[in-house]
Image (cartoon, rainbow, N blue to C red):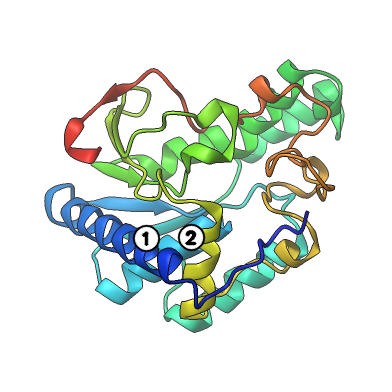
Amino acid sequence: MPAIPSIDLDDAALRASLARKIEDATALLRRVAAEYRPAALANSLGAEDMVLTDLIHRERLDIDNFSLDTGRLPAETYELIAVAERRYGRKPSLYYPRHELLEAYVRAHGINAFYQSVELRKGCCHARKVEPLRRALAGKKAWITGLRARQSATRAGLPRQVFDEVHGLEKFNPLADWTEREIWAYIRLNDVPYNALHDRFYPSIGCAPCTRAVTVGEDIRAGRWWWELPETKECGLHFRGQKTDDRGQ
């Protein structure tokens, strides 16, 4: 299964559903910009977040754009950061791990300890992603993600708006009900830049040591932490069981 699905851009039904989804997502982004300032897009530089980056740019919305540089991202992800800067004329705010946390983790457990257990993998994710996210969200009233309900079993039933009790602010998922075909149709129709690894059977991209290409018949997130069971495949950035808001449905 290729990472990028085959898409017929002349498919009338696809274009109609995409138009509706764009209208809904844009309306939600406008509301976030108007009612929850300051707000920020947590840009993982995946296909979904590049769609959101493009929508925010087209609407000229006052929404910040930040990414977490874990220090172990693929070279292709850094190249996409540079390409996006040129395309959209703005640099994302980049947040890095605190050196003392990362150094302590590596000294105690080793450079690739995340392969040894779920607990050690989550410890690495905490130092490289979770703690930097807390700093990135400090002072914000809302954050926006590119999560989709169909991405994995851990994201089924994903709401469009939820109160993030961990960080104490609203969280919005404007693409929650989008399909993979709709994501890629938007990218193709609007010439949105994307990570070159998507062309090499990487539908979901994280840190280089924790991401592999998928094979025929595998789930789109099968290449993330592939040595773990599906129900453990989250890094700690996104929590379930939070309070939903019907206005975001």
What residue occupies the far left of the structure in this picture? Answer: 35
Foreground: disc 1 or disc 2: 1
Q: Please tell me whether residue 56 is drawn above or below residue 207 in the rendered image.
A: below
Task: Compare residues 57 and 173 and report the one nearer the observer.
Answer: 173
Type of amino acid at the residue the image marks with label 1: Ser
Query: Percent x, y for residue 32?
Result: 21, 51
Q: Residue at x 49, y 82 (%)?
A: 87
Where residue 58 appears, as percent x and y from the top left, is: 31, 76
Which picture quadrant has residue 74? Answer: bottom right
| Residue at point 61%, 29% (across, down) | 234
Please state which amino acid type lies under the numbered disc 2: Glu
Q: Is residue 119 above or below residue 230?
A: above
Vertical position of residue 7 compared to residue 73: above or below:
below
Residue 145 x %, y %: 42, 47
Residue for badge 2: 182
Mark 1–mark 2 contact, CB under 8 Å? yes
The 10 Å Cα crowd at callout 2, few under 14, some 14 to 19, many 20 or more, is: many
Please indicate, yes or no, whether residue 140 appears anywhere in the rendered image: no
Task: Measure the alpha-carbon separation of dots 1 and 2.
Answer: 8 Å
Task: Give the left or right position of residue 101, taking residue 76 as reference.
Answer: left
Q: Secondary structure at mark 1?
A: helix
Q: Between disc 1 and disc 2, whose residue precedes? A: 1
Residue 20, percent across and down? 29, 60
Give the SS element for disc 2: helix
Which quadrant of the figure contains the C terminus?
top left
Any mark on residue 110, and which?
none
Task: Give the residue number, with chain letter if any, for mark 1.
Answer: 17
Q: Residues within 10 Å of mark 1 (few under 14, many from 20)?
A: few
